[in-house]
Amino acid sequence: MRKNYHYEDMKKKLFAFLAVAVAASCMFTSCAKKNEPKKAKYVFYFISDGTGVNTVQGAEYYLGQSRGIQGRVPLCMTSLPVVGVSATWSSSSDVTDSAASGTALACGEKTYNSAIGLLTDSVTETYSIAKRAYEAGYAVGIGTSVPLNHATPAAEYAHSVLRKHYFEIAKQIYATGFDFFGGSEIHIEHRQNTPENRQLLADMAKEAGYTVTYGLKQYEEMGRNADKVIMLQDQDVPDVYSLPYWIDRKPGQVTIVDQLRAQIEFLYRKSGEKGGKGFFLMNEIGGKVDFACHANDAATAFEEVLAVDSCVKLAYEFYKAHPDETLIVLTADHETGGLTLGCQASGYSIRTNLLKGQKVSKDESTRHFQALRAANNNKVSWEQVKQMLTDDFGFWDTVQLTADEEKQLRDIYERSFKGHMSAEKNLYSENEQMSATAVRILAAKAAMGWTTGGHTAGLVPVYACGVGQELFMGHNDNAQIPLNIAKAMGLKW
């Protein structure tokens, strides 16, 4: 048979064209993949409650002067490649509360003070980045150094017209399906705190498949390899309401660093079991910075910022092992206390080194004085009080007092230990007047000033590192932060 050479030639040309087209397509696809923006696979979303710009800078001066250095010693968080600030106003006030700011940081929506996960109509529910990450297949963890149903963590999973509806908020934990919850306790308001309601929450946890552990030992034995876990602290600690202040921590107690280390290990494992999508972790690592600032306790607040920085270091170590897949973002929900660094009487100086004389928080000092009262049937001598002030605050030892300062303390002794003087209250604790006065004297000597025992509208810091870090540069608004995290993760909003 005679060959059709024209046909054969056309066929060869067609095959050659197709080969070139396929090769070009593969090259284009390969180039497109190389040019695709990276997505954050592992996300650390840290919130340091009540922490303003001055709170962090004060901690850096505190660290510097304790080492004999003039000026700040940079923390890990302030050394991250992106440093910005954020405004924190709510829909109802320029000064936000933690519920409204928590909702903005979780859900990307402004709402009114006291509301959690609701829009301003008090009806429409708004959903968090944690929920969106979970629905996208990420392993999800929520952590805090205070109760799990406190405002900031609750904004990631709950909807409530009032942040103080703790029992109703607590019941919403178990429906999330989130992989890890960690905090001090699950708090229930007094009128709802009955054995029946406690049992109801325990039954809900069991039905939802959660293993609930108390303390480090129990977590290691029961929680580490569980499917879903709720990690709480031991119930026999002096203050079950929150994890211990960093300045007060004792061996064996769960700290925020212990909890974060457990979360990272747990969520990394769970991510692999879910197909390797990754994990999203929101942890209010600085929940007790806020407590210390409400108490106007500078040394305790700065020590707590150092605890926050220890957590950032853990996350940064993870980032270094996964630099092309990790995003770290740290911000605050608001500033608390109106902290100033330097005051008129001090001239152009601050003396944070004097704060190192303080060995315990105001709360722990209060417990010490209460124990002293109990051991002596309230018949406590001035010499005993002076020794306690030396032990707790370094007075007459590393911190020398003026005659006027000693008179202040002696007057409080006469009125409090020989007469009757009510405790000094702040939002989260009641303190012995002796402890409160000692903290005030120490702050004044260090040239630390406080304008309020509540929140302010001061700017808060924003620090970022990793995939999408550029989204957090400059002047942020808190409601934009979760949207930008979602963008870095490639999540639809």
Image: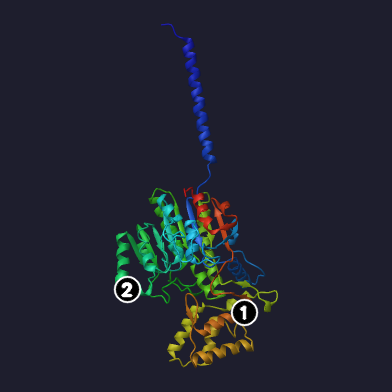
Evaluate if marks 2 and 1 touch, with contact meaning CB atoms under 8 Å apart. Answer: no
Residue 172's image quarter?
Answer: bottom left
For this view, does 25 lie left or right of residue 1?
right
Image location of residue 255, percent across then percent down:
46, 68
- Tell which of 67 and 51 is nearer to you: 51
From this viewpoint, is residue 258 visible? no
* Residue at image coords 43%, 88%: 374
Q: Which mark is residue 382?
A: none
Q: Quadrant of the N terminus?
A: top left
Sort mark 1 into few (<14), some (14-19) or many (20+) by Cα contacts within 10 Å.
Answer: some
Position of residue 147 relative to residue 446, above or below, is: above
For the residues carrying marks 2 and 1, which lies nearer the camera in this image? Answer: 2
Q: Earlier in the sequence, mark 2 or mark 1?
A: 2
- Tell which of 264 and 443 is nearer to you: 443
Position of residue 70 relative to residue 413, above or below, is: above
Image location of residue 359, percent across then percent down:
53, 78
**3D distance between C-alphas at marks 2 and 1:** 44 Å
Image location of residue 213, percent across then percent down:
36, 66
The residue that disc 2 covers is: 194
The residue that disc 1 covers is: 444
| Residue type, numbered disc 2 | Thr
Position of residue 137 relative to residue 198, above or below, is: above
For this view, does 74 lie left or right of residue 42?
right
| Residue type, numbered disc 1 | Ala
Return the residue found at the far front: 121
Image location of residue 248, percent across then percent down:
49, 75
Sort mark 2 into few (<14), some (14-19) or many (20+) by Cα contacts within 10 Å.
Answer: few
From this viewpoint, is residue 68 visible? yes
Element under disc 1: helix
